[in-house]
Image: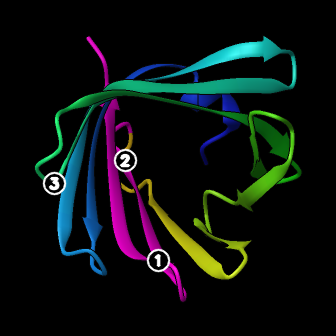
Amino acid sequence: MLALSDFEGRWHLARRVEDHRAGLTGRLDGTATWSRRDPATLEQTETGLLHYGSAPPMQATRRYLWRADGQGIAVFFDDGRPFHSFRPQIPTARHHCPPDLYDVTYDLSGWPRWTATWQVTGPRKHATIVSRYSPAP
């Protein structure tokens, strides 16, 4: 069974964003690094070049905090607000960002290659976001 420490390190990140409402597709190619912030916390930092629709590419960065939580992993925004939690053996979670819902499924079956698929639904958003992670050289 995977533990928080298994995510530590540098990963190649390939993300595809399907904005169903706007009819646009985006992609981000970059890296995701899980580094030790303190004995109980990994800081996830994603950086990459985002291509979205016909707009010029732009540099994108995001950060989250990951902590062991019983038999699972709790994920927080970088300011410490709760985001979601999941257990590797039941790798699904939901985040309510009123008025929209974010449902994630982690596919860890091909470890160390894995994906996170988000389905975003609600009155403001309708998107599918698939992030593929693989060990970085």
Label 3 vs 2, first from the N-terminus: 3
- Three-letter amino acid code of the residue under disc 2: Trp
Q: Give how far apart the Cα atoms at labels 1 and 3 are.
A: 16 Å
- In the rendered image of this protein, does residue 81 appear above or below residue 99? above
- Three-letter amino acid code of the residue under disc 1: Lys
- Three-letter amino acid code of the residue under disc 3: Gly
Q: Residue at x 60, y 43 (%)?
A: 2
Q: Which residue is mark 1?
A: 125
Question: Residue 16, position in %: x, y?
Answer: 24, 53
- In the rendered image of this protein, does residue 77 appear above or below residue 11? below
Q: Which residue is mark 2?
A: 114
Please tell me whether mark 1 sits on a helix, a strand or a loop.
Answer: loop
Q: Give how far apart the Cα atoms at labels 2 and 1 are.
A: 25 Å
In the depicted view, which residue is nearer to us: 10 or 17? 17
Q: Give how far apart the Cα atoms at labels 3 and 2 are.
A: 26 Å
Contact? badges 2 and 1 (CB < 8 Å): no
Question: Residue 22, position in %: x, y?
Answer: 26, 74
Label 1 packing within 10 angstroms: few (<14), some (14-19), many (20+):
some
* Furthest residue toward front: 55
Colouring chosen for the image of the structure: rainbow
Res. 2 visible in picture: yes
Q: Which residues are magenta?
A: 112-137
Res. 30 visible in picture: no
* Furthest residue toward left: 54
Q: Residue at x 73, y 34 (%)?
A: 65
Label 1 vs 3, first from the N-terminus: 3
Label 2 packing within 10 angstroms: few (<14), some (14-19), many (20+):
some
Left or right placement of residue 95 versus residue 22 in this view: right
In magenta stretch: residue 28? no
Q: Which residue is mark 3?
A: 53
Among the 4 quarters of the image, the one containing residue 7: top right
Among the 4 quarters of the image, the one containing residue 96: bottom right
